[in-house]
Image: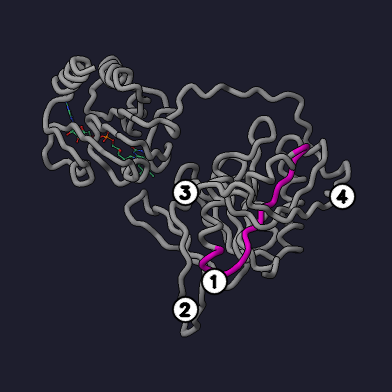
Amino acid sequence: MSAENSVMVYIQQQSGAKAAEVSLELISKARELADELGVEVSAALFGERVAAEIPRLAELGADRVYIAEDPRLKFYTPVPYSKLMIRTIQERKPQIVLYGATTEGRDLAPRVASCLKVGLTADCTDLRIGDHTQQDKEYKHILYQIRPAFGGNIIATIVCPEKKPQMATVREGVMRMGQPQPGRKAETVRFDPALGPEDFPTEILSRVLEEKTVNLKGANIVVSGGVGVGSKENFRLIRELAETLGGEVGASRAAVDAGFIGKEHQVGQTGVTVRPKLYIACGISGSIQHRAGMDGSARIIAINTDPEAPIFSIAHYGIVGDLGEVIPRMIKAYKARV
Ligand SMILES: Cc1cc2nc3c(=O)[nH]c(=O)nc-3n(C[C@H](O)[C@H](O)[C@H](O)COP(=O)(O)OP(=O)(O)OC[C@H]3O[C@@H](n4cnc5c(N)ncnc54)[C@H](O)[C@@H]3O)c2cc1C
């Protein structure tokens, strides 16, 4: 299979030179797209000592890993990283390049796009392969870059059929990480970063990492509260239910905006995407932006006083009632059973 025309993923590092979860999710998605196109999956991996990540990338579906190591690449800075990414794309000619829609991906991808004069779609929530006709010209097997637009009121499919590579950033947790295939191998293509002192105009003197206190993505149970909770004090009920069930606390954006709880708890289009075994939505109406972050949950329970609330259209179990009465009864019933 040719190394050109691949579906390439930019591998972001997180602390300890580990590949970020979103990059691994994207390798899995790239595998799906590449299989449909009959091409390879490639990965662009830059850093100080990052080669230990290659087996993981291979097991998740990468066929070829382009790696450049240099102690000065320990932490991401825009100039050397964009230079390396641009060079890798120019030399290896992928047809699609994917980045995580993280702070780093959002910094890097537009720099690369503007230098290569190609399109870039930010914050995609789905990617597919399809055909497209424009002014009587037919384009085969191009990337459909799908994302909410106009405040989430429509789901737009964006195409960049003329220029290659087609590039997109994808939000964390939106794509499912596939099952690794133990022992699967990738070809490693090591290259000299060939960076001079002029490529490092910024020096990182120290880096302070804030510990994550909320792990919504990894939780099996998420209990979320919305505006219907009524106040910051009433959020105690949501925390109590989450604690009783061994789950995490989530929230709607409106609840975050109202100051009931911190932004790190927000679920939805501009928050975290979750897929727990159980999602309990309390006093949440079920706007399209909220649903975008939780409608992949295996089981959804909704508690709402309004029987017409849109959340009931996706809930597996609906309770029409005041959460101030329903939640204490749920806690009592659960405690009585265990
Ligand atoms: C670009 C953009 C991005 C956005 N991103 C997000 C996002 O990431 N996440 C997100 O959540 N929103 C997001 N929003 C906001 C979204 O449009 C909604 O405004 C928000 O989700 C509504 O939150 P809510 O359901 O808590 O509030 P509301 O829509 O006000 O609903 C409150 C619900 O509580 C019920 N209720 C009231 N009292 C009680 C009670 N005592 N017991 C039980 N039920 C009760 C009501 O019947 C109602 O259904 C975004 C909006 C835009 C424009």
Mark sitting on residue 134: 2
Which image quadrant is residue 207 in?
top right
- Residue under label 3: 175
Nearer-the-camera pick, 134 or 237: 237
Q: Earlier in the sequence, mark 1 or mark 3?
A: 1
- Of helix, strand and loop, which one carries label 1? loop
CB under 8 Å between callouts 1 and 2?
A: yes
**Marks 2/3: CA distance?**
29 Å
- Crowdedness of circle 1 by 10 Å Cα count: few (<14), some, many (20+)? many
Percent from the top left, x then y, of residue 23? 58, 45
Residue at x-position 55% and y-position 58%: 31
Mark 3 within 8 Å of ligand 1, using the beta carbon: no
* Of marks 4 and 2, the one in the foreground: 4
- For marks 3 and 4, give the CA distance: 34 Å
Residue 8 image position (x, y, % from top left):
63, 57
Nearer the viewer's eye, disc 3 or disc 4? 3
Q: Which residue is mark 1?
A: 161
Part of the protein shown in magenta: 34-49
Q: Which badge, 4 or 1, comes first in the chain's sequence?
A: 1
Query: Reading the chain from its start, which is encountered first: label 2 or label 3?
Result: 2
The reply to whether callout 3 and callout 4 are in contact (CB within 8 Å) is no
- Quarter of the N terminus within the rendering: bottom right
Ranked by sequence position, the earlier of labels 3 and 4 is 3
Q: Which mark is residue 194?
A: 4
Residue type at tag 3: Met
